[in-house]
Image: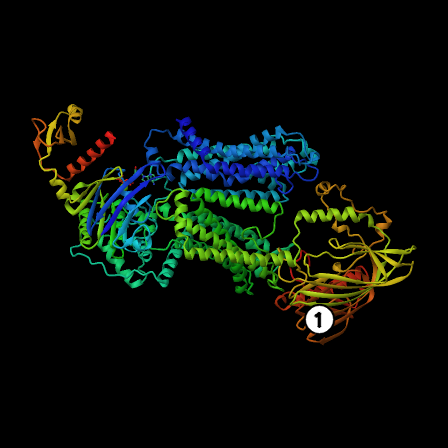
Amino acid sequence: MFSEIFRLELRQQLRSALFWLILLALAALAFGAACSDSIQIGGGIGNIHRNAPYVVITMLAAFSVIGIFLIPIFVSGAALRDFASNTAELMFATPVSRVGYLGGRFVAGWLVSVLILVGVAIGFWLGSFMPWVDAARLGPTPWVAYGWALGVIVLPNLFFVGALLFLLAIATRSMLGTYVGVLAFVVLVVVAGLLMGHGNISHQTAGALMNPFGGGVDLATRYWTASDRNTRVPELAGLILGNRALWLGISIMLLGATLALFRPDREGLRWFRRRRRITAPVEPATAAATPIVLPLVHLRSGFAARFRQFRKLAWFDTKSVLGGAAFLVMLLLGLANLTGALSFTGEIYGTPVYPVTHLMAGAMDSNYKWFLLIVLIFYAGELVWRERGAGLSEVVDAFPTPDWMPLLAKVAALAAVIVVFLAVGSLYCVGYQLLHGFTHLQPLLYLQFIGLSLLAFLLLGILALVFQVWSNNKFAGYALVIGWLILMFGLSQLHFNDNIYRFGSAPDTPYSDMNGFGSFWIGNLWFRAYWYCLATALLVVAGLYWVRGNVGGWRARGRIALQRFRAPARVALALSLSGFVAIGAFLWHNTHGLYRYTTHEVQQKLAARYEKDYRKYMGMVQPRITDVNVNVAIHPKRRAVDVTGHYTLVNKHDKPIDTLLVQLPTLDTRESSVDLDFPAHTATLADRRQGFYLYKLATPLAPGASMPFTFHEHVAYPGFANEPAGERLIHNGTFLSSDAFPHFCYDTDRELKDNNDRRKYGLGPARLLPRRSDLAARGDNLVSCDADWVHFQATLSTSADQIALAPGYLQKEWVQGGRRYFHYVQDSPILDFFSFQSARYQVARSKWHDVNLEVYYDAGNAWNVQRILKAMKLSLDYYTRNFGPFQFRQLRILEIPNYFGFA
Amino acid sequence: MLTIRDLSKTYPNGVRALSDVSLDIPNGMFGLLGPNGAGKSTLMRTIATLQDPDSGSIKLGDIDVLADKPATRRVLGYLPQEFGVYPKVTAEAMLDHFAVLKGVTRRGERRDLVDALLKQVNLWDVRKRKLGGFSGGMRQRFGIAQALIGDPKLVIVDEPTAGLDPEERQRFLNLLAEIGERVVVILSTHIVEDVTELCPRMAIIAEGRVRLAGEPRETIRALEGRVWRRAIDKNALPLYRDRMTVLSTRLAGGATLIHVLADAKPEDGFESVSPDLEDVYFGQLHHAAAAKKAA
Ligand SMILES: Nc1ncnc2c1ncn2[C@@H]1O[C@H](COP(=O)(O)OP(=O)(O)OP(=O)(O)O)[C@@H](O)[C@H]1O
Ligand SMILES: [Mg+2]
């Protein structure tokens, strides 16, 4: 009996396209991990071989974790097959034994999952033989590790997950119950991971035992050297053995429970029987004596009627999702996860911070929204198959609703679901804020975040719907969406990041309380418009292929699609496609015309070329900057700046200098130019792309002599780039630095850092920091390679509503031509590193002895100004007492937007 | 008046479900008889715009059913042979939903209509119950209510009485007959009696072909004096089958009763019976089988 059922089940599983699809997708991923740098699974980095035993084990372990999303399909699919296909009553009427039935199904489902992992191992193994793989990064094929990983990690892992989900599937008789199981399980693993992360050693042990995926391995190999990782396989002892034994035992218990709970009958398991007042069965028709006359009604099909029908359908579908268990489960899990995230959001490096709205939104981004992803993918399938699943399609398909309506209603339903999900999360965050006594609520900002996310998620929802309609097979639809997500992930791993070909993607919209969304939302919305045009076109085509009635086969669907392809569909398709192309051209003009889109590959090549071509000029004798006088005109609205700078360069060496090395900034925006003006010279090398120039001076600069050097720099950030560009030059909170001025040395920061990257481009190993005895290196200070102390003064101008700041004491402030001017002079020499700020600042002033204390802050962020002033005073007290006197007469603290990883 | 001409349909799996079906169906009840797999549902689905034939045409008055599906759907009431429900929705809400889809978008109108329909199919008392808790017959009645929304001109009901208790069946058939006075009602069934009693016109289909179309009484009259009955021994049945056209066999009180079609008394022991529609039906099937064997 067992073998009969087992063989039947196995044959069914192996025949399904889904199995092969998943097998191939994962094997391809493993293949890529073995032979490309872009996919990193298992940790074959640095000195560790790509196919080191350690890598093989972690890689296969990682894939067995991915497996938890696949096992529901195979194991639970096997458990639920008879219920799904309504053959349960037939099956249970046969004299199949419980053990034979369950065992056959389970073992087959489990074996199929194992086969997938074997496919992964084979993919990885094949990948390590690819000719382009650097032989230096390969060791001998670690057969033992493959065997160890499969035997110790993969088989038991899948066994456990399989047993858990099999139990859930049998007990709940629903795929949903099983998905809930997956999630509960993920939570378990996350908790174990958190415990592992704790410093406390006893927690680590508990965590290692608790992690059903063989947590002990991590602990056992934690302190392994690269050479250990290249040769050794962990011993099957101690925590690893304990962990495996524990979970194997639990798995067997789960299977035992399944066996005990399994009820081969129609009702299935009842966890609780609801006590209800017993309603009498309906009275057998006491036929109404008087015949009933149906009232006369009008059937309408005008615009208003269509709209009402659409609204009704959309609401009906929305309700079905909102009331769906999967939705509620995801919502609750999301909120639970969000709660955890929020408790961390309240601190930055241990310092409590106000729960401001954008922090709440950040927590939702990272810990809440991906549940929505699952909701969308799942319900896209549910909704498309809703009528057919319920067996109602023949009824509703015969109603006089237009062909496009059901699909569009489902799009609307998904949109509503997204809004509800995000709104619930936002309200939850508001609750959290209020609970913490934080009453500065920003409902409008929440709405903006919701709107931006809605635009992003709905595109995914539409794609999922379209896949479902096209494939006309629920599981193939799911597989397509998942395949697409994997593809997107793979593309970003391979650094194919141009939004122009990544469906649905758009530049980020970084937010700061100072600058809001700045002008970053513009590019985002244009890209969304672009993708919505394509999504509309896809929907039109999906609408043509929408199955209505009893049509099977592509041929028949194609014929119907052709019939439906009349004027309205044609116009819609033509409009959306031409919108797509037109907006696409506009986007291209912005992201590739106004900006330079440099792929990762090209960036690396440039860096390698830079080092190869110009490293030889490092340490070349150059004059040093002694005086800086700049005129900086900031145009916040236009996001532009014009700088005129005057340097004085002095030859501090004992030999004349005949060649000047000039390094200019290389920016992404094409609206950037630098004109130089200095004594007679000829260019001997001009590399615009790298910004690297060599000028032969007509008269060499004698030792001790000085020369003027003037530059005019213009930079602007018009339109938008593929990713937010120019975060330093914005509407409110400009924060420029002297990095972007011309300099006179080879820039070591541009070199490739990673040794594997360097080897790829034929560069030697990365250089270590110079030795302490290296006098040439000691000739430079921390921030500059072409200056020591400099005299500095600056004239800044900005729009009338902003204050512009630079180092130095304010000499004069005036208004001219509707712009505000500031002249700063630093009367003592300083390091050659300055920043220039401009924003609508408020100023709080105070004094500490004769030092002016000033805090420049945004009106919306007046939170801690007094504390900052107090801290400044206390600090000055402490530092002057313990270290030395304060050398300046002012101390200013300025707020900058939180676009940067520092403050 | 529904006019069907040369309708043919072959499923992708090679089953020829309809071949050259031509029928003229006037207002009134029209019965479709045929064995399982004859193509009744296929025909009805095709008329109900849910499926395209390979060839042929269907006209309802001046509506070309196959070309102008929206127009057809506006005047159609269709009850499929099998249908499900959303288990968590109440009968009233579901019917209301359907009424909107049908085009009854005025709320007041719709409420009156839904109430009346629920009363008509005797589901008024359970209107607030979820459909998931309905019995098979109650569900069927709900399906009937749904098919009557919006005063359809063409009512297609596929085995509507399956699962109904005798009383409900009667009620429903009466209702149909009443509706049938004004519009085209196509009814498929396996209960030959229903057709005899209710349908002024009928057709018998087998293996996708129309075997016979006409008025039941007329077709019965054609067999007058040609149907013979005899009680025989069970084991002798093959012999009879070889020698004569056995229409039907029936076990009655231990003996096997057979009906035989013959122009004259086939043998001693046979007695003449007045034919009924069942005899017509079996006669046609017999023809079909014989034709097939000959081919
Ligand atoms: N979707 C389909 N795909 C392939 N073959 C089909 C399909 N639907 C029906 N058939 C076949 O077409 C033939 C006619 O089927 P149909 O459902 O029309 O018969 P029916 O007369 O309604 O039978 P019943 O009395 O059992 O309901 C049958 O042989 C059936 O197997
Ligand atoms: Mg049928």
Q: Give the residue drawn at x 19%, y 33%.
A: B286
Q: Which quadrant of the figure contains the N terminus of chain A?
A: top left
Reply above or below: B271 against A600: above
* Nearer to the camera, A789 or A435: A789
Q: x, y (%) of residue B257?
A: 13, 30
Q: Residues within 10 Å of mark 1 (few under 14, many from 20)?
A: few
Q: Quadrant of ligand 2?
A: top left
Q: x, y (%) of residue B41?
A: 28, 43
Q: Is residue A215 visible?
A: no
* Nearer to the camera, A619 or B10: B10
Reply above or below: B33 against A376: above
Query: Residue B226 vs residue A696: left or right?
Result: left
Q: Give the residue drawn at x 82%, y 61%.
A: A884
Identify the colour scheme used: rainbow
The yes-or-no answer for disc 1 within 8 Å of ligand 1 is: no
Reply above or below: A811 against B150: below
Residue type at the position of mark 1: Arg
Q: Which quadrant of the figure contains the C terminus of chain A?
A: bottom right
Q: Residue A698: which quarter of the image?
A: bottom right
Query: What SS does tag 1 mark?
Result: strand
Q: x, y (%) of residue B271?
A: 7, 31
Query: Residue A729 vs residue A705: left or right?
Result: left
Q: x, y (%) of residue A100?
A: 40, 28
| Residue to which mark 1 is pinned | A845
Q: Is residue A272 visible?
A: yes
Question: Which chain is disc 1 placed on?
Answer: A
Query: Residue A774 vs residue B88: left or right?
Result: right
